[in-house]
């Protein structure tokens, strides 16, 4: 059996963790909204049409912020279509997903739904077909109490108090030729800067996210990010980055996706720091990884001009769940700069949660690592010193066979340790040394693994891929030994004795 060692020193803190790093995403894409979170005719729907079986499932993920309404959808969306009496709202063509949009769910419905789900909104404005002025009107509608045309219009629509959304995205993936009214970096930078000025004039307390590169593979990466940041540095608070992975037949490279994500984040940090130096600025630009996940884009099959078609309804396997766990270790280990992140998406469209329009809710395999880290990876994150072997991958070269994450929450006195073993053939005996945290008692050990890496959950067999609870029999101490099964994801929870 292979061996490895992980040493965690409490003095080597990386950062406090912004809870918004466990955000998610609801776009008007496929069935994410309609028959996803909103289905008035469903047996569990409340008086507003919100499915409470879905809300209950989301609440267990402890998601603090949700990006809305897109995504590609937002670049051709007029937010005014989704307000006012529902019977007067127009049905439009959605250019992003070639669907019919009935506008029965809009910004007010989202605000109500978010409150019931126990989360907040990250609102994206249309910088494709939209204008800076229209973005300002939306902020006025949402965040000004009364006394102006749009704030009073909101009150006419039954919302006396403003929604007070505090995070706003300046468009979506505007570097992409697939985007409605895509822009060059220079065009976007000018439009984003002027929009940012208007939005902060409307509400000086909001935070703004500028569009960064939508992929490492874009020919304009990272020049796009440099151009945007040089033009907008003092007007925005975050630069966004998006990253998706899919299995292409090479399990080792797929499991090593966590390594590639860290490289992507490192490049964006360096680009942002170059812009900081050029501006002679005292402000450090933070990162918003507001789209990330496993996404089988090659499986996309868009049927034109249907209402709520099934789009990107990926059925996630154990292998996919392991990759998601690895990506989470990278995201949280970069919490000094990544302050917000959104698992894209939340329901039905490339999501951990799947709904049956005539039935219940299914948790895909990817639901579980996200649930574990979101609920227990709180407080502060610490640097791990890992001594282990590397494996050779076709895409990324040599990659450490263990991806680890350690967090400590001083409010609960709990330490959480998460580890992905990407070795496909070997179990690993891990020596975990936590001396600096004092005497610790092991509270819980969960392992996600199995012989069939392509096993999936289904409505017929919803618990085929779920974490196994291991009996806890370790004595109180500061150093522990655990067997990490081959191709596995493990969560360990400790409490100060």
Image (cartoon, grey):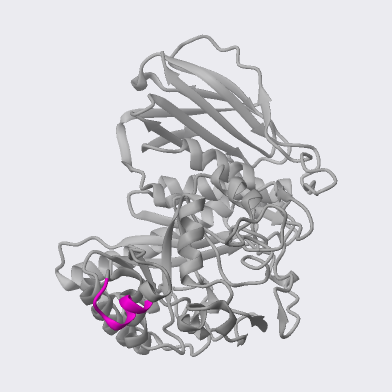
Q: Dividing the image into 4 quarters, which one contains the C terminus?
A: top left
**Magenta highlight: main SS:** helix
Residue 195 vs 335, above or below: the answer is below
Magenta-span inclusion, residue 225 = no
Residue 223 picture location, percent across and down: 38, 78
The stretch in magenta equals: 146-153
Q: Is residue 319 left or right of residue 182?
A: right
Q: Is residue 237 above or below residue 476?
A: below
The residue depicted at 66 percent of the width and 22 percent of the height is: 470
Residue 100 vs 337, above or below: the answer is below
Q: Quadrant of residue 299?
A: bottom right
Asked whether the viewer can see residue 253, the reply is no
Q: Residue at x 39, y 58 (%)?
A: 266
Residue lying furthest top:
475
Identify which residue, 85 or 338, lies in the foreground: 85
Task: Kindly tell me whether residue 243 is visible in this rendering.
Answer: yes
Q: Which is more toward the observer, 84 or 125?
A: 84
Tell me the residue at 15%/62% (across/down).
Answer: 282
Q: Picture coordinates of residue 478 (x, y %)?
A: 43, 16
Percent of width and height locating residue 40:
66, 63
Residue 76 at x, y percent in the picture: 52, 85
């Amino acid at each position: 059996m292979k061996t490895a060692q992980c040493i965690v020193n409490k003095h080597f803190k990386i950062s406090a963790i912004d809870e918004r790093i466990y955000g998610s995403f609801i776009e008007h894409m496929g069935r994410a909204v309609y028959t996803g979170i909103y289905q008035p005719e469903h047996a569990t729907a409340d008086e507003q049409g919100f499915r409470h079986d879905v809300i209950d499932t989301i609440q267990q993920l402890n998601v603090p912020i949700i990006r809305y309404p897109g995504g590609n959808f937002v670049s051709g969306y007029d937010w005014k279509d989704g307000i006012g009496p529902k019977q007067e709202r127009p049905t439009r063509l959605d250019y992003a997903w070639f669907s019919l949009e009935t506008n029965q769910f809009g910004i007010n419905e989202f605000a109500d739904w978010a409150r019931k789900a126990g989360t907040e909104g990250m609102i994206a404005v249309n910088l494709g077909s939209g204008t800076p002025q229209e973005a300002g009107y939306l902020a006025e509608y949402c965040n000004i109490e009364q006394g102006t045309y749009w704030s009073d219009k909101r009150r006419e629509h039954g919302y006396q108090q403003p929604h007070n959304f505090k995070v706003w995205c300046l468009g979506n993936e505007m570097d992409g030729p697939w985007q409605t009214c895509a822009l060059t970096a220079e065009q976007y930078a000018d439009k984003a800067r002027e929009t940012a000025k208007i939005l902060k004039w409307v509400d000086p307390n909001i935070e703004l996210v500028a569009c960064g590169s939508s992929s490492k593979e874009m020919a304009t990466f990272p020049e796009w990010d440099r151009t945007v940041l040089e033009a907008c540095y003092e007007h925005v608070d975050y630069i966004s980055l998006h990253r998706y992975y899919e299995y292409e037949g090479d399990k080792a490279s797929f499991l090593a996706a966590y390594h590639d994500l860290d490289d992507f984040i490192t490049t964006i940090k360096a680009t942002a720091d170059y812009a900081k130096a050029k501006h002679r600025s005292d402000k450090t630009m933070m990162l918003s990884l507001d789209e990330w996940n496993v996404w089988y884009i090659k499986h996309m099959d868009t049927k034109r001009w249907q209402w709520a078609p099934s789009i990107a309804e990926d059925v996630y396997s154990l292998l996919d769940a392991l990759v998601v766990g690895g990506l989470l270790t990278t995201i949280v280990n970069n919490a000094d700069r990544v302050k917000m992140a959104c698992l894209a998406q939340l329901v039905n469209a490339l999501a951990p949660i799947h709904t049956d329009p005539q039935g219940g809710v299914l948790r895909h395999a990817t639901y579980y690592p996200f649930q574990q880290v979101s609920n227990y990876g709180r407080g502060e994150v610490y640097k791990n010193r890992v001594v282990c072997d590397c494996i050779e991958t076709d895409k990324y070269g040599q990659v450490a066979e263990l991806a680890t994450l350690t967090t400590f929450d001083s409010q609960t006195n709990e330490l959480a340790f998460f580890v992905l073993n990407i070795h496909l053939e070997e179990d690993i005996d891990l020596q975990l040394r936590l001396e600096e945290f004092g005497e610790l008692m092991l509270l819980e050990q969960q392992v996600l693994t199995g012989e069939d890496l392509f096993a999936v959950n289904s409505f017929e067999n919803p618990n085929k891929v779920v974490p196994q609870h291991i009996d806890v029999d370790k004595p109180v101490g500061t150093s522990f030994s655990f067997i990490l099964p081959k191709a596995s994801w493990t969560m360990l929870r400790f409490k100060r004795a």
